[in-house]
Image (tube, rainbow, N blue to C red):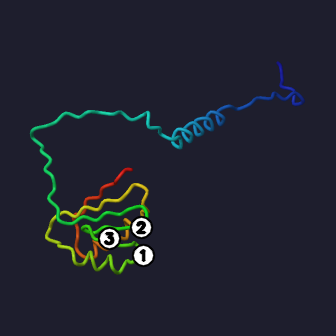
Amino acid sequence: MKFLDKNKSSFSIEITPLIDIVFLLVIFFVVTSKVGDSQFLSLDLPKTESFGYEAVQYTNEILIINNGTIYINDAQFNIENINDIEQAIFNLENNENVLILSAESNSLHQWVISIMDLLNKYGFTEIQIRTIEK
């Protein structure tokens, strides 16, 4: 009968944890990779007769420019004069019409949020937000 010699030790590498680590790394890189614009499709959707989009009739419009200028129904304000802006929003007609809030794409989000907060404070619940591209 052949016995194992304790002086001879066989060296082996266990690869099961290695496979687990490789799969975790693959999942990490897939999740954190940046999705490029080339992965999106440009679709021309068909027009339907059952759903018609009607242009919204509005009486109030607020425009935020990237230099801090705010236009409320063609009246010009500076973002630093928040009290004047609040008074102008208070004076707007709130007769259940939709208010349009337009902002340039590179204007600060803080300005948009501040204006939305003031609008909510004075009861404007229907707000359409639009982005103006340059």
- Residue 36 position within the rendered picture, expressed as x and y whole percent measured from the top left: 47, 38
| Of 68 and 42, the residue lying toward us | 68
Choose the circle earlier in sequence order: 1 or 2: 2
Q: Amino acid at mark 2?
A: Gly
Check disc 1 and report its element: helix, strand or loop: loop
Residue identifier under label 3 = 76
Choose the circle earlier in sequence order: 2 or 3: 2
Q: Amino acid at mark 1?
A: Glu
Residue situated furthest right in the rendering = 7
The N terminus lies in quadrant:
top right
Residue identifier under label 1 = 80
- Can you tell which quarter of the image residue 75 is in? bottom left
Quick check: 69 left or right of 74? Answer: right
Relative height, residue 106 to residue 90 (above, below):
above
Check disc 3 and report its element: helix, strand or loop: strand
- Can you tell which quarter of the image residue 94 is in? bottom left
Q: Who's the residue at 27% across and 76% down the image?
A: 88
Residue identifier under label 2 = 68
- Residue 100 position within the rendered picture, expressed as x and y whole percent measured from the top left: 25, 61
- Can you tell which quarter of the image residue 91 is in? bottom left
Check disc 2 and report its element: helix, strand or loop: loop
Q: Amino acid at mark 3?
A: Gln
The reply to whether the C-beta atoms of the residues labelled 1 and 2 are less than 8 Å apart is yes
Quick check: 71 left or right of 57? Answer: right
The crowding category of the residue bearing disc 3, from other C-alpha atoms within 10 Å (few below 14, some 14 to 19, many at least 20), is: few
